[in-house]
Image (cartoon, rainbow, N blue to C red):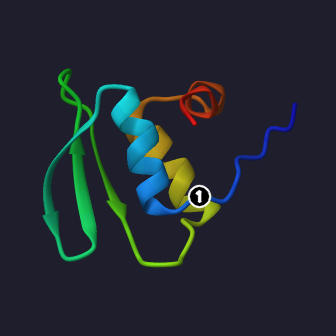
Amino acid sequence: MSHKLPALTGKEIIRALSKSGFVEIRTRGSHHFLLHSDGRTTVIACHAGETVGSGLLKKILRDCELTREQFRALL
């Protein structure tokens, strides 16, 4: 299995994280703020037709305290 994550849009990431218990608490422009019931938070930028870069995706996963394998299972 490849360790590389697929190129995903912001909406796809939000959809996957919502399966893990994150809920969107507010939006400011194109930035969506997500919160988990245990206090974990992250911000995801949703720009039409653009994918989230690999560095930003790693930061989001670190904020959410998810491994690549856990996130891949949510996709």
Residue that label 1 marks:
8
Q: Residue furthest right?
A: 1
Determine whether 38 is above or below 2 in the image. Answer: above
User: x, y (%) of residue 75?
Assistant: 58, 37
How many numbered discs, if any?
Answer: 1
Q: In this view, does 15 lie to the left or right of 29?
A: right
Q: In this view, does 6 lie to the left or right of 45?
A: right
Q: Is residue 4 placed above or below 75 in the rendered structure?
A: below
Q: Determine the residue positioned at 38% across, 41% down.
A: 63
Mark 1 residue type: Leu
Q: What element carries label 1?
A: loop
* Residue drawn at (24%, 45%) of the image: 34
* Residue drawn at (19%, 77%) of the image: 29
Q: In which quarter of the image is residue 48?
A: bottom left
The front one of 69 and 59 is: 69
Near mark 1 (Cα within 10 A), the count class, few <14, some 14-19 or many ≥20, is some
Q: Position of residue 12 (x, y in %)?
A: 48, 52
Q: Residue at x 66, y 59 (%)?
A: 7
Left or right: where 69 falls relative to 27: right
Q: In which quarter of the image is residue 41?
A: top left
* Residue 1 % position (x, y): 87, 30
Up-down relation of residue 32 to residue 36 (above or below) = below
On the image, the x and y values in percent for residue 27 come to 16, 63
Q: Could you say which is closer to the camera, residue 19 or residue 52? A: 19
